[in-house]
Amino acid sequence: MHASGPTSEGENTVPTIVIIGGVAGGASAATRARRLNETARIILLEKDADVSFANCGMPYYIGGEIEQRGKLIVADARLLERRFRIEVRTRCEALSIDREARTVRVRSIPHGVEYDLPYDRLILAPGASPFVPEMDGVNAPNVFTLRSLADCDRLHGYLEREKTGLLRAVVVGAGFIGLEMVEQLHRRGLKVALLEALPQVLPPLDVEMAHIVEEMLREKGVDLFLQAPLASFSVENERVVAVHTRSGQTLPTDLVILGMGVRPNVALAQAAGLSLGDTRHIAVNASFQTSDPFIYAVGDAVDYPHEMTGRPASVALAGPANRAGRLAGQHAATGEAPAMGGVLGTAIVRVFGCTAAVTGLSMKAAKRAGIDATAVMIEAGHHAGYYPGAQKMILKVVYDPASGRVLGAQAVGGDGVDKRVDVIATVIHFNGVLGDLTRLDLAYAPPFGSARDPVHVVGFAGENQRAGLVQVLQPDACLDDLQVVDVRTHAEVEKGGKLLKASHIPLDELRNRLEELDSTLPTVVVCRSGLRGWVGARILSQSGFSKVYNLSGGMLMRAHACPTETLV
Amino acid sequence: MHASGPTSEGENTVPTIVIIGGVAGGASAATRARRLNETARIILLEKDADVSFANCGMPYYIGGEIEQRGKLIVADARLLERRFRIEVRTRCEALSIDREARTVRVRSIPHGVEYDLPYDRLILAPGASPFVPEMDGVNAPNVFTLRSLADCDRLHGYLEREKTGLLRAVVVGAGFIGLEMVEQLHRRGLKVALLEALPQVLPPLDVEMAHIVEEMLREKGVDLFLQAPLASFSVENERVVAVHTRSGQTLPTDLVILGMGVRPNVALAQAAGLSLGDTRHIAVNASFQTSDPFIYAVGDAVDYPHEMTGRPASVALAGPANRAGRLAGQHAATGEAPAMGGVLGTAIVRVFGCTAAVTGLSMKAAKRAGIDATAVMIEAGHHAGYYPGAQKMILKVVYDPASGRVLGAQAVGGDGVDKRVDVIATVIHFNGVLGDLTRLDLAYAPPFGSARDPVHVVGFAGENQRAGLVQVLQPDACLDDLQVVDVRTHAEVEKGGKLLKASHIPLDELRNRLEELDSTLPTVVVCRSGLRGWVGARILSQSGFSKVYNLSGGMLMRAHACPTETLV
């Protein structure tokens, strides 16, 4: 079937802005365009039934934290039509773009009709699709991805329908969505196994930070398999009944969730001859224009320059998609818009009451990008220790040793992790240095923080490192050629064990027992979290010891960085 | 009695650093000095029995949220002595300073002995004392201030002892401590009246923001009296039984808390001939040196340059005191230290589950300082609305209309207020503009925020204002000469009432009902919170209306700014 659009379609004298895709920044683009241009014709095409929905909320709906499906529908078509005079065409698929004629070939899915829709400006927000490996059983009715509302309905329906028979689930991929799904399936009473091909969960984090999360997952009863890439499925009666890993495990299961990352939806753009970038996303300039200036692209199908590396980063996150959509809508409606600026890849996940967040570069990302970096790490309470309910967090800041510029931060803990990472993301936005962390005037009252906020403390510690007041070794350092002094209390050492070769001298006795140590040997001081180690290192380095280090993060982070090391 | 100090006192060859006062930055100075200088002699004089304690925690101990008094003792003398080799002399009062001889005259309170203590560097951390008016009854056993641990013990003891007979309390002064005390006394079951001489609670906030807190206090059953300065007490049997205000109220009471601000303790410094600044605090340079370079001063007895005005600001807050102490200790121990930078007066209070916070300049502070400023205000959820438990906050940003530079922020709400104010305080630290607020890459997952964080949204709204896309009127604006269009729904208007002269046209009908309005008249669009008003204002200003405003904060903040205005 083949039909032309309404007769008015080609005759418009006001500019027509067509947006393909409501979810990943498309709805933002549409409403922003309308606010700035009352006369433009604005048409939003969406191949699904709902114009926009909260995809970040889906795991919580699956698990039952969000009870009503309707809560996920954040911008309904009626509102867009009535308030913003946007022509919303749901269940309409864009088949191709004729850039010469400036038309989009559209197919109305329910009616089967096709027509050409003229545009003056076209905004592509096609999003991304979950990666699904080619594998027997991958299309079984108990194997799921979670990206579209249809995915969500399918999984939710299955869980409700089969409730009584479901005992075990396997989640493949320990990224942010994978971890959220682990928590929510656990919440529903399933025994969950989590497979990850890499040696750690949460790949954007450094390994010892991720290890804190791994330990917590195991404590909650999650079967965690690292360096365990998916190999194959066993299928019985058309259902997957077991998952096999390349490292040899076989995991019987009633349900599989694939959280193996996403691939940008670039087929339409590519078929239209638009350029793709190095990372195979749609290439755009600072105004989100593609290689055709009449066509914009936003959301997970494009990548954004990373503020720290300058290289394209495919973040696939809602925040940047939303802000990009808004700016592309503004540019399409008015011909100008400010630049969005780079992204930092700031991301956060809450899993079983533990929060892990990251912004900017990790140590390994810096290494990968060839950027000289070192790190400082502290343990701190999220508010004053004397006020009830203080939760510990580990806060790590990656910085440039030459300039002190803050390059990134990671935090794992409970409440207040989000605040510290947001504050440090703001410091990074302004190219701030460690000293800036110490000088921030942050809001303090006992329920909210400390007179010395964790952000100040990590800045102080970083400045001490940089000034050479203390030399640090990172948690995974090789200690073989060093004299090791453990300054924890007797009780701590008895309870937790100490490194094989460490001399144990409690900090408060150190000044009186210096003769037990050899001041000519390079020496590392070790405590529980690194705080007393720094005091101890200062005592030694001011007492004639030739070379003194503090072990950053103490025994706490050593255990996370070198979990198999022998203690006595 | 009169005795010289230990014989070694005058014979030291290593520098001696003497610190007067452990609480307000003194302990920080001492430990920092030790970390940097292992050989210096460091002596800490404190006239009270405890060397340092958490004064910010006292209200919570009074109310029972903090159960053990021991929790308030944050740095005990034993730790300072054993770990940092600091000579702690508690219950020792500094009587005078001989700057010529570089000695402090010290009196040991328990022993009654006096001696001269030589110093090479002296750090003053004398703190501040509560203001107590000269008034009959002010020394009665049921009238309290809350500054020292002795104050705290006295009040706590009284409340425990007289528990059964205490029904009513009057708190004088609606600053941060006053509000914390209101909550904690209420928590103990007392009926609380709160008196404030000014027309609002929380003087650092603008009036309409403070009004949100006032309404909440009244809802909780607090008797709030504004513009009601303390006049006198009625005393019976040596106890205050009623409080009289200058505005004519008489409030029977069993207990009075004075929270009328503090005065810096400058007597010792003044007697030694050290200069005071304009605000009668001890004058210091960027390294916290007084007019005598061998003497430093930190904490609530000094003022700090305000980052926005450049003028001295007496903040009397724990954060700056702590950071200043650290830097003064560093300078005293090594002869150098980085500058602390200015303060923003960032402050926060939690009262009955409501959180109010401020950083930088309010509109009225800008006016007072002669700084051109305007404001933008939004209402937003502290996290995604579709995730359960989202709490509303009102966020106001004050900015320079010419440059867009962010000058200050205020927020009132529940969870997440602290995070947004800290992020904006960080933006202000870097002299950021509204556009920076929109470009921050903040951590988003449904339990923590929104893809459009309140910080982004207030930045968007501010940029729209600055770009002239919408002109706004502040919540307290005079609307007399304007055509007023209320674009809320019928249900909202029926429930909440509307302004006397407003035409009511729901937003989604506005485009079709333009002929009901006079496009030649200056027009203000009003909605509930200001968000739909901005959409409505855009529709009108693009439809030939000559001059269109949005009412910032909508009816919500209008009610707070003009609480007595008539609605129909």
Image: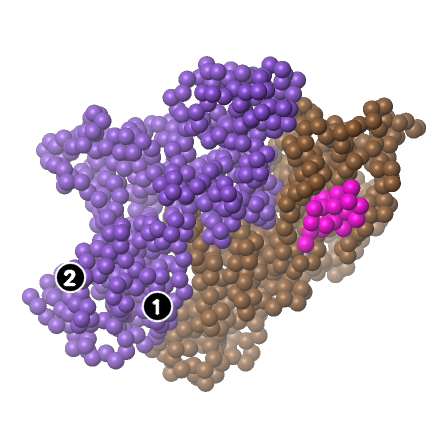
Chain colours: A brown, B purple
The amino acid beneath tag 1 is His
One can see residue A528 in this view: no
Residue B9 vs A135, above or below: the answer is below
The residue carrying mark 1 is B331
Q: In which quarter of the image is residue B486?
A: top right
Q: In which quarter of the image is residue A120?
A: top right
Magenta highlight on residue A225: no
**Magenta-tinted stretch:** A283-305
Q: How far apart are marks 2 and 1 (CA)?
A: 25 Å
Discs 2/1, front: 1
Most foreground residue, A459 or A548? A459
One can see residue A316 in this view: yes
First along the sequence among labels 2 and 1: 2
Dominant secondary structure of the residues highlighted in magenta in the image: loop
The residue carrying mark 2 is B95
Most foreground residue, A514 or B178? B178
- Labels 2 and 1 within one chain: yes
Most foreground residue, A481 or B423? B423
